[in-house]
Image (cartoon, helix red, strand yellow):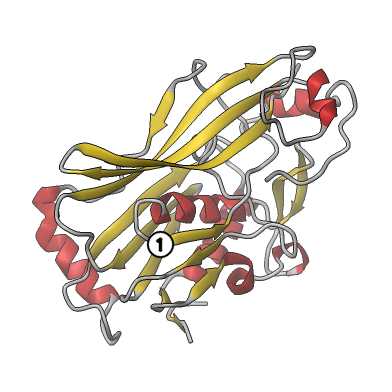
Amino acid sequence: MPTHRGSSAILPLLIICCLTTAFSILLGSDIFQNWPPGQNGTPTVIQDNEATNPNDEESTDNDGIAAATEGLSGFDGAVIIGNYSATMQSSNAERAANILLAVETINGYVIEPGATFSFNELVGDVANDPLYLPAPIDYDGEMIIGRGGGVSQVSSALYVAALQTNLKIIERGPHLAYWSFVPMGLDANVVYDSMDLVIANETDFPVLITARAGGQTVEITLIGQALEAGLVIEPQSNLVENHLPGDPLPDGFSGDESYADVAFYVTETYQNFIYYNNVLDSVLLARDYYLVPMG
């Protein structure tokens, strides 16, 4: 059984020919930022993240790893194998409280060898949990106020950190519209009984999730056995198309045909396996579509 140590594809939609006035609210809010987020075809590579400790703090890292893994078996010689910090430009206090609660729930969780981690199974049905507060959430591509807003920022930070490791992503889904706490294509939306982040540890070593939050910032660090010398795994998200209303739908489009009448972005997300600075393999993980707020 996994150990818990701590304090506590787009969904099918019916979309009308033009976006509702709610997108005007989105465009003017502090939740959605920086439209468009990049030029067509511009890659966003997640590496050397600010939250990752620099090499000159190796002794501090070792002390932190020793403290985090104290009393746990299988972590001799463990290192930081994944790390990501996600920040939202928001001042919503209820959202910050939800983030902290979710962080406290997953902090200290160990994904044992052969085990599978489910974000929803651990964190629970936040939409019906009175401990979670009403805050901005994505509902059918619109920003509304709903209980548990902010929790998907935690799952998204965990997703990006996991993509830097040899853990296997079993399930992950995007938001319908872009939220700026991670690059497009690197978010992991969670909706209880509908959309989950599921991660499998198919290695011979346990992986410890450590999580912390401050305000609108979430930092996830994964501790486990180091990859083989010279091997680095990096997630990469590419914005491949900016679809405008009336444009032909992209080749291989898997969404609702009514998307032909709306604006959306198309992203492709890869996991790059780099050995001594040479890319050995680049695996396509997902092709996602994000609705564009229109004023």
Residue 39: in sight, yes or no? yes
Q: Position of residue 11 (x, y in %)?
A: 76, 46
Q: Is residue 204 left or right of residue 13?
A: left
**Picture quadrant of residue 81:** bottom left
Can residue 35 be seen here? The reply is: no
Res. 235 image quadrant? top left
Q: Nearer the viewer, residue 96 or 71?
A: 71
Residue under circle 1? 167
Q: Residue at x 52, y 50 (%)?
A: 156
At 15% from the left and 43% from the top, the residue drawn is: 276
What quarter of the picture does the C terminus occupy?
top right
Residue sitting at x 71%, y 46%: 137
Residue 201, picture quadrant: bottom left
How many residues crowd around disc 1 within 10 Å: few (fewer than 14), some, or many (20 or more)? some
The picture places residue 145, in percent across and down from the top left corner, at 77, 46
Vertical placement of residue 26 versus 110, above or below: above
In the rendered image, residue 75, in percent from the top left (x then y), is placed at: 24, 78
| Pick the front one: 2 or 41 | 41
Image position, residue 202 (x, y; %): 41, 70
Residue type of the residue flagged with mark 1? Leu
